[in-house]
Amino acid sequence: MKQSMKLKAIALVLPLVLGGFAWGEQEGRPDPGQRAAKELGLTAEQTQSFQTIMKAQHQQRKAVHEKYRDQIQAEMDQVYQSTLSQLESVLTPEQLEKFKAHHEQRKKAMMEKGPRGNKRGGDCGPGWKQKNTKTEG
C-alpha cells in the first residue's frame, strides 16, 4: 500500500518536476542561460556556472523520470483498466468502444506531439493562430 501511495505521489509530482524550472534546459527554446542572465542580472561567470548547474539538474530529472517511467505507466494502466470496468456498467457496448477509441486517439496524439504537445510558451504555430485568432468581418 505504501508503495502504491509513493507511485501515486510520483505520478502527480513528476510532471511538475519535469515541467521544469523556467530557466532550466528546454529543447526548442532560446538559450535559458541568457534569459536567466538578463532577468537575474548575472555576470558572464555566473551565467556559465548557472548553465552548468541547470544542465546537470536537467540530466538528474531525466534520470529520475527514466527510473520511474515503467512503474508509473503500469499504475496508470491499472487506473485505466479500473475505469473501463466501472464504465462497463454505465455505458452501452457501442459507447464503451467509442470511449476506448477516443482514449487511443488521444494517447497516439500525445505520443506524436510529446508530453506538452509542443505548445508551451512562445509561438504555438500557424494552426493554433488560425484557429484562435478572431477576425472581424
Image (spheres, grey):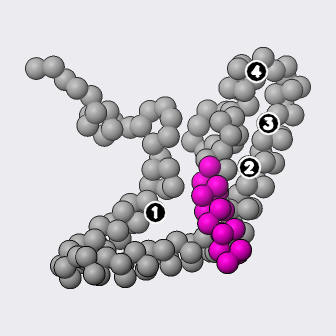
Q: Nearer the viewer, mark 1 or mark 4?
A: 4
Q: CA distance from mark 4 to mark 2?
A: 20 Å
Point out the tag, 2 or 3, that comes first from the N-terminus. Answer: 3
Asked which quadrant contains residue 86, the reply is bottom left
The tag on residue 58 is 2
Q: CA distance from mark 2 to mark 3?
A: 10 Å
- Tell me the element at label 4: helix
Which residue lies under the disc numbered 3? 51
Residue 18 visible here: no
Query: Which sits in the foreground, 58 or 78?
Result: 78
- Tell me the element at label 2: helix
The image shows residue 3, relative to residue 35, as above or below, that is below
Which residue lies under the disc numbered 1? 111
Is residue 12 left or right of 63 when viewed as pictured? left
User: Badge 3: few (under 14), some or many (20 or more) residues near its Cα, within 10 Å?
Assistant: many
Amino acid type, mark 3? Gln
Amino acid type, mark 1? Met
Which residue lies under the disc numbered 4? 40
Q: CA distance from mark 1 to mark 3?
A: 29 Å
- Residue depicted at 82% across the width and 34% down the height: 50
The C terminus sits in image quarter = top left
Is residue 8 left or right of 78 when viewed as pictured? right
Residues at badges 1 and 4 in contact (C-beta under 8 Å)?
no
Instruction: Tell me which segment is drawn in magenta.
Output: 1-16
